[in-house]
Image (cartoon, rainbow, N blue to C red):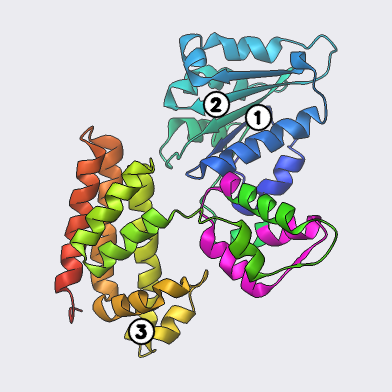
Amino acid sequence: MKVSTREADAFIRKPHSDVVAVLVYGPDGGLVRERGRALVRSVLGDSDDPFRFLELDSGKVSDDPARIIDESASMSLTGDSRVVLVRQADEGLVKAFEPVLDLDRSEAFFVVEAGDLGPRSGLRKAFEGAKSGAAIPCYVDDAEAVTGLIRQAVKDAGLKIDPAAVDDLIARLGSDRLISRGEIEKLILFKGTDGGTITADDVEQSVGDVGAVSTDEVAMATASGNVARLDDALQRAYREGVATVAIVRAVGRHLQRLMLAAADHQKGMPARAAMAKLRPPVFFMQQNEFSAQLQRWTPTTLGRALTIVTEAELDCKTTGLPDAALLERALIRIAAAARRCIGES
């Protein structure tokens, strides 16, 4: 069965009784891990019985596919339900799970964590189409999801938060759920849990820029057509250990935000007003540059640039060529387009 994003949290709190295996997958690795942990807790509760929990990596399962069906028949010493967690699952595990997905009953509940799986993925299809399986997608948090995460965590801590503090915090957080949750918890600890209201000053003092200043700088330099600055920002990102795919996605997100504002700007809305509609808001130190980019780019040229970004990410994952070279070539192409696209439509 397919579990929609809207239904995911309720399903995780109380998995369906006829489901024996759940695939948790998606581009947000932090959310995949968080939901995987939550499923384990839903079944085991507060139990720390080591005989009720087993963690396997995909390599072990690939080497011994029969291990999964064997685990489904193995009872714990206490007779209570068991959980088997499989991490980093890939397409090679389809045959290992097919027998389990046909079971009406299993002594073990399987939680399977995987990365981003497309609609054609055999593993995803197996879980979505099975009577005893379920698949839960974990997409990158958007502003609305992050806002909900912030407000719920603050409420649970007995605190309140100013709207300006929410906006500032969203601008600083990245798209990885676990990292974002960690920064929110750090903010709550900074403020204390004895009541009170979190302000923008509290955010400024306690939360780092999880969204990675270096990747923001790469995105801004690319969209402004500043090749020298782009090279400096890329080298900084490499020194910080930022993955090439993370960089190309950051550029893609920036171009998407530009496209949203450019669509309004093309209809006659002033650049500043179009920019002000974006959520999360543009960081105040980048507003002048962002506004200038809106004068430079149009929805048409941004569409071409986004195609370059999409192709670059795909090439990084599939061609086997050096990621850095593919990334740099794509970003230089976009930066060059930024320098010549004034007045294009």
Question: Which residue is painted at 65% across and 29% down in the image?
Answer: 132
Looking at the magenta stretch, what is its main secondary structure?
A: helix
Q: Position of residue 60 (x, y in %)?
A: 51, 13
Compared across the picture, whether 136 is left or right of 125 comes to right
The residue that label 1 is drawn on is 132
- Segment colored magenta: 150-179
Q: 186 above or below 298?
A: above
Disc 2 marks which residue?
87
In this orientation, which residue lies closer to the viewer: 21 or 321?
321
Helix, strand or loop at disc 2? strand
Q: CA distance from mark 3 to mark 2?
A: 45 Å
Which amino acid, mark 2? Arg
- Residue type, mark 3 in image: His
Which badge, 3 or 1, is on the more N-terminal residue?
A: 1
Q: Nearer the viewer, mark 3 or mark 1?
A: 3
Instruction: Verify CB contact (< 8 Å) between mark 3 and mark 1.
Output: no
Q: Position of residue 162 (x, y in %)?
A: 69, 72
Residue 136 in view in this figure: no
Quick check: 170 above or below 237?
below
Alpha-carbon span between mark 2 and mark 1: 20 Å
- In the image shown, does 85 or 198 lie closer to the viewer? 198
Q: Secondary structure at mark 1?
A: loop
Residue 66 sits inside the magenta stretch? no
The quadrant in which the C terminus is found is bottom left
Report whether 188 appears left or right of 287.
right
Rendered residue at 32%/43% (across/down): 238
Q: Which residue is mark 3?
A: 265
Mark 2 crowdedness (10 Å alpha carbons): few <14, some 14-19, many ≥20: some
Q: Earlier in the sequence, mark 2 or mark 1?
A: 2
